[in-house]
Image (cartoon, rainbow, N blue to C red):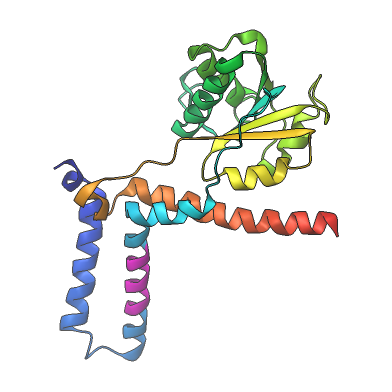
């Protein structure tokens, strides 16, 4: 019964009950402006509730996914695209996000298949009080824990966004457009990432980290704050895909 213990669930239910009570007891006699305001609040509540459901988050993610590329010759470089870090009280207490950890594990499994590629951890730490390479250091630690030797790992601390990953990579010694590269990111982010890397290098392969969490059974239809966070990220990803598509059109016109 763990889902029923969620404070978020009870907060959503309480808000819904209050809205229903208002419409039932006072809605008819309320001023038109008050009724309009309450309808807006009800619509916002309904949207928040829907976005908090596992099936809705999965529905947002499904069209963003693409199948992994067909197996080819081993890539020369595997790029692990950064997600971010969870700041601690000090840099020593920082941790990678679960999403970043999944990406690092996927990259490690790919590397272990042939053990020939170089791995580049892409992404600059967004926190102003952290060194630019802090995110890369944490991701490197995750790769080391999964059996990747430190000698093949390089940190790319220049790119702040997906759009900048290629430019950031090309600033590194030994990285050129003539290489065969592989990219690892979350399945819901792969479509946008692949669009950025396509045509930038001699060859491109990709592997997606595991799909986002989901609830099973009846609990899938209970509001959950974690799925609200997932839905928020997925809505941003949809917007990002549109923006990047327009940027690519502008760059080629």
Quadrant assignment, res 29? bottom left
Quadrant assignment, res 170? top right
Q: Residue at x 19, y 84 (%)?
A: 26
Q: Residue at x 50, y 56 (%)?
A: 235
Quadrant assignment, res 129? top right
**Residue 43 lies in the magenta stretch:** yes
Q: Nearer the viewer, residue 184 or 142?
A: 184
Residue 203 percent across, percent down from the top left: 75, 33
Q: Nearer the viewer, residue 35 or 217?
A: 217
**Residue 236 lies in the magenta stretch:** no
The answer to whether residue 83 of the structure is visible from this angle is: no
Residue 141 percent across, percent down from the top left: 53, 16
Q: Nearer the viewer, residue 139 or 116?
A: 116
Q: Residue at x 56, y 36 (%)?
A: 185
Q: What is the quadrant of the N terminus in the image?
A: top left
Majority secondary structure of the magenta segment?
helix
Say whether residue 115 is left or right of residue 77: left
Q: Residue at x 33, y 67 (%)?
A: 46
| Residue 169 vertical position relative to residue 63 in the rendered view, above or below | above
The answer to whether residue 143 of the structure is visible from this angle is: yes
Q: Nearer the viewer, residue 186 or 207?
A: 207
| Residue 146 vertical position relative to residue 203 in the rendered view, above or below | above
Residue stretch rendered in magenta on the structure: 38-47
Residue 135 percent across, percent down from the top left: 58, 26
Q: What is the quadrant of the C terminus in the image?
A: bottom right
């Amino acid at each position: 019964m763990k889902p029923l213990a969620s404070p978020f669930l009870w907060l959503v239910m309480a808000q819904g009950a209050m809205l229903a009570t208002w419409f039932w007891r006072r809605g008819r006699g309320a001023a038109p402006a008050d009724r309009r305001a309450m309808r807006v609040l009800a619509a916002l509540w309904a949207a928040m509730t829907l976005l908090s459901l596992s099936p809705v988050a999965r529905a947002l993610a499904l069209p963003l996914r693409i199948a992994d590329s067909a197996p080819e010759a081993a890539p020369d470089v595997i790029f692990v695209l950064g997600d971010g870090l969870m700041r601690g009280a000090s840099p020593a207490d920082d941790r990678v996000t679960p999403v970043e950890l999944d990406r690092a594990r996927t990259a490690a499994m790919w590397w272990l298949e042939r053990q020939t590629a170089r791995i580049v951890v892409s992404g600059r730490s967004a926190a102003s009080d952290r060194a630019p390479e802090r995110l890369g250091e944490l991701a490197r630690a995750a790769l080391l824990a999964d059996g990747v030797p430190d000698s093949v790992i390089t940190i790319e601390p220049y790119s702040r966004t997906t759009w900048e990953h290629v430019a950031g990579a090309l600033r590194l010694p030994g990285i050129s457009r003539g290489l065969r590269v592989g990219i690892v990111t979350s399945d819901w982010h792969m479509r946008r990432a692949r669009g950025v890397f396509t045509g930038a290098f001699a060859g491109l392969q990709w592997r997606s980290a595991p799909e986002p969490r989901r609830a099973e059974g009846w609990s899938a239809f209970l509001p959950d704050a974690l799925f609200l966070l997932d839905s928020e990220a997925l809505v941003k990803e949809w917007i990002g895909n549109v923006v990047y598509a327009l940027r690519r059109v502008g760059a080629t016109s």
